[in-house]
Image (tube, rainbow, N blue to C red):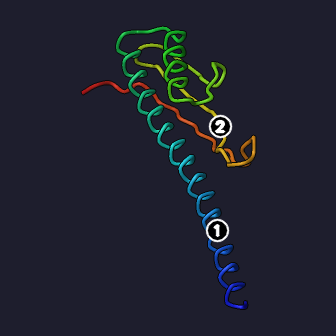
Amino acid sequence: MVDGAKKNARRILVAVWAIVALYYFYVSYDYIRTAMNDDRMADYTHYVVQLAGNEARTPKEVRSLLLVKADELQIPLKADQISVQGTGQTLKVSLQYDVKIDVPIFQYGFYSKHYEHTIAYKQPR
């Protein structure tokens, strides 16, 4: 009977560790996904700044291009979080946003990651 109780205790312990491991895997996965989406957004912002600087696009066009990409990447970016200064070769764009890292079981995230990007037009060589 004692051996059966030890086996049950081991099974419970393994189950608890498996649940803990799955929890951390999920949180890590969501954190990595968020970081990768932010990298894609930064690359796209750089591309848009260079394009808009070369083609003298308006701040409204720049803002809408960035909002469409943010929506595509599921980044909670709003128009007021995008600052577009200057035009042409003096163009400078700043983004600031927070992304909540999902936590399993809970309806809201306990952890939030803040991202900031400031990208200025650079003359092509």
Q: Which residue is mark 2?
A: 98
Q: Residue at x 56, y 48 (%)?
A: 31
Position of residue 69 in the picture relative to residue 96 (left or right): left
Position of residue 103 in the picture relative to residue 41 (left or right): right
Question: What distance separates the C-alpha of mark 1 from that of mark 2?
Answer: 34 Å
As displayed, is residue 58 above or below residue 120? above
As displayed, is residue 56 above or below residue 112? above
Report the amino acid beneath label 1. Ala
Q: Secondary structure at mark 2?
A: strand
Quadrant that contains the C terminus: top left
As displayed, is residue 39 above or below residue 17? above
Residue extending furthest toward the left: 125
Q: Residue at x 60, y 65 (%)?
A: 18
Q: Earlier in the sequence, mark 1 or mark 2?
A: 1
Residue extending furthest toward the bottom: 2
Count of marks overlaid on the render: 2
- Front-most of 65 and 104? 104
Report the amino acid beneath label 2. Asp
- Find residue 117 and report its horizontal and vertical position in percent: 53, 35
- Front-most of 23 and 100? 23
Q: Quadrant of residue 85?
A: top right
Badge 2: residue crowd in 10 Å (few <14, some 14–19, many ≥20): few
Q: Residue at x 68, y 44 (%)?
A: 112
- Find residue 30 and report its horizontal and vertical position in percent: 56, 46
- Find residue 12 and report its horizontal and vertical position in percent: 68, 73
Nearer the viewer's eye, disc 1 or disc 2? 1
Q: Quadrant of residue 94?
A: top right
* Circles 1, 2 touching at the beta carbon (< 8 Å): no
Q: Residue at x 42, y 27 (%)?
A: 44
Q: Secondary structure at mark 1?
A: helix
Q: Which residue is mark 1?
A: 15
